[in-house]
């Protein structure tokens, strides 16, 4: 009797009919009674589902659908034939399994994991039992404005956009029809997704969750889907990109990302060799890389709040005009504007590729700010100090930031002029030399000439 049981990656192709299932169960029961290492994990791996609350509760009745072998050394290996037999039993090949809906789903997901391990396509019966998620894709074109898609009654746009200096809304569309995997999405299935968004909304992530993580994980959403409608054979979904997803906003603007994929649980019907999706339980509408499997989708509209002021659209010239008024009213300084532009220029470079234009604009703005700052200092000094030499001396002694105001500059000049040593030095520039007349003037002139000759 092994004292340790280990789950391995080994696959057995032995005839499942020749495996003694009763002996298999007895080995595991004995291991459980003796407290063998790893025994509890192994039992839950060998059987697709345990019906009882505890492993010790009636193993012969509650441990169902085995599909592994246990070797003499305690190693547990997946049996390919056992896996197929378990799937058939779950589908009711011998009799309807006495399982609850949740137990059937648990068993199906367990068996689906092994199909992925073997890189095999699972049968449709197993997918349906597992509530397997499937994705439907959607793309950004230009036939639907953001405000054309109704907002769900539960959605609070103001709260969702609170604190976001650059909020963004998007609309994506998905037509009824065949997906890339050949499934036919009916209008009814799309309308169910629309209804889900309007009744309670859906989150949007960067890529899909793993199916086995859906019940236990909640990634941070990058988009909140807040409205939807179905019109002319297409479903439209309206979303707000989350405040924290600045990268996604840039990707959407630059069209580097322009597809989403609706992730959820489809209800399938087979008809004339076709697989029809007749119902759909959506879990999320996620942003995905281009070319992934699913329905063709498109982003049809992008709405940005910096284009809407007072409910009316405003072009960039009007925004510049308003900005200039704020600068003139000293509500904001030119230096602050340049500082903001400096941090934003890299984004514009990435989006438009206009690197030289962006750099030239930045350079011109910096030169303008420097010239205005220099004039501000000169004007302040001239108002307090007479004489060019004295003014130059005071200017050299000033040490102020580039965004200093006129009042701050004046304050610094006052501090300099209050120093007795500095006042004495500056005072010497005001001593007038007596006028030179007559012979004295000639002497001075001659003397000056002589000095120049030397």
Image (tube, rainbow, N blue to C red):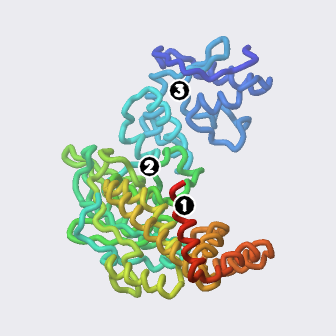
Report x, y in % for residue 65.
54, 32
Q: Judge whether residue 51 can be spotted in this image.
A: yes
User: Residue at left 34%, top 68%?
Assistant: 302
- C-alpha separation, residue under disc 2 versus residue under disc 1: 90 Å
Q: Which residue is mark 3?
A: 67
Residue 28 located left or right of residue 437:
right
> Dot 2: few (<14), some (14–19), or many (≥20) neighbours within 10 Å?
some
Determine whether label 3 and label 2 are within 8 Å by CB.
no
State the mark number for residue 42: none
Q: How many circles with numbers are drawn on the protein?
A: 3
Viewer-nearest of discs 2 and 1? 1
Q: Earlier in the sequence, mark 1 or mark 3?
A: 3
Give the quadrant of the N terminus.
top right
Real-space Cα distance between discs 1 and 3? 118 Å
Residues 232 and 107: in front is: 232
Label 1 crowd (10 A; few <14 / some 14-19 / many >=20): few
Q: Residue at x 63, y 18 (%)?
A: 23
Specify whether 104 is left or right of 260.
right
Say which mark, if any, is on residue 450. Answer: 1
Give the SS element for disc 2: loop
Judging depth in this view, the residue of 283 and 65 nearest the camera is 283
At which x and y percent is residue 245?
A: 49, 59
- Sequence-wise first label, 3 or 2: 3
Closer to the camera, 32 or 174? 174
Q: Label 3, label 2: how many angstroms apart (C-alpha)?
A: 33 Å
Residue at the location (45% across, 45% down)?
129
Figure quadrant of the C terminus: bottom right
State the image coordinates of residue 238 (x, y, percent, origin top left): 37, 69
**SS state under label 1:** helix
Q: In which image quadrant can residue 436 be found?
A: bottom right
Which labelled disc corresponds to residue 207?
2
């Amino acid at each position: 009797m092994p004292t340790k049981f280990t789950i391995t990656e080994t696959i057995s192709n032995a005839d499942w009919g020749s495996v003694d299932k009763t002996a298999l169960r007895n080995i595991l029961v004995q291991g459980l009674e003796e407290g063998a290492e790893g025994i509890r994990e192994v039992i839950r791996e060998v059987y697709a589902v345990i019906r009882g609350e505890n492993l010790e509760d009636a193993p012969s009745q509650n441990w169902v659908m085995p599909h592994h072998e246990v070797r003499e050394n305690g190693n547990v290996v997946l049996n390919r034939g056992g896996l197929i037999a378990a799937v058939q039993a779950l589908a009711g090949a011998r009799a309807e399994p006495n399982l609850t809906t949740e137990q059937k789903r648990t068993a199906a997901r367990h068996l689906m994991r092994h199909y992925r391990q073997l890189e095999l396509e699972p049968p449709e019966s197993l997918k349906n039992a597992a509530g397997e998620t499937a994705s439907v894709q959607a793309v950004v074109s230009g036939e639907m404005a953001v405000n054309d898609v109704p907002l769900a009654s539960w959605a609070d746009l103001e709260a969702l956009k609170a604190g976001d200096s650059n909020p963004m809304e998007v609309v994506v569309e998905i037509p009824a029809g065949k997906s890339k995997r050949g499934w036919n999405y009916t209008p009814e299935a799309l309308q169910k997704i629309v209804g889900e968004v309007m009744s309670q909304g859906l989150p949007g992530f960067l890529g899909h969750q793993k199916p086995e993580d859906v019940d236990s994980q909640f990634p941070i959403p990058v988009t909140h889907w807040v409205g939807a409608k179905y019109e002319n054979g297409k479903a439209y979904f309206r979303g707000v990109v989350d405040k924290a997803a600045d990268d996604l906003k840039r990707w959407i603007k630059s069209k580097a990302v322009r597809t989403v994929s609706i992730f959820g649980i489809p209800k399938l019907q087979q008809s004339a060799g076709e697989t029809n999706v007749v119902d759909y339980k959506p879990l999320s509408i996620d942003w995905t890389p281009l070319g992934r499997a699913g329905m063709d989708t498109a982003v049809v509209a992008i709405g940005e709040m910096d284009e809407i002021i007072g409910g009316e659209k405003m072009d960039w010239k009007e925004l510049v005009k308003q900005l200039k008024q704020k600068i003139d009213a000293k509500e904001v300084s030119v230096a602050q504007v340049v500082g903001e532009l400096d941090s934003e220029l890299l984004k514009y470079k990435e989006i438009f590729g206009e690197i030289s234009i962006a750099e030239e604009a930045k350079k011109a703005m910096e030169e303008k700010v420097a010239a205005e700052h220099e004039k501000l200092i000169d004007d302040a000094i001239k108002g307090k100090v007479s004489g060019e030499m004295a003014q130059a001396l005071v200017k050299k002694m000033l040490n102020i930031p580039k965004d200093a105001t006129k009042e701050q500059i004046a304050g610094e000049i006052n501090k300099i002029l209050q120093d007795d040593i500095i006042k004495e030095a500056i005072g010497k520039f005001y001593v007038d030399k007596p006028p030179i007349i007559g012979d004295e003037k000639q002497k001075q002139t001659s003397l000056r000439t002589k000095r120049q000759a030397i």
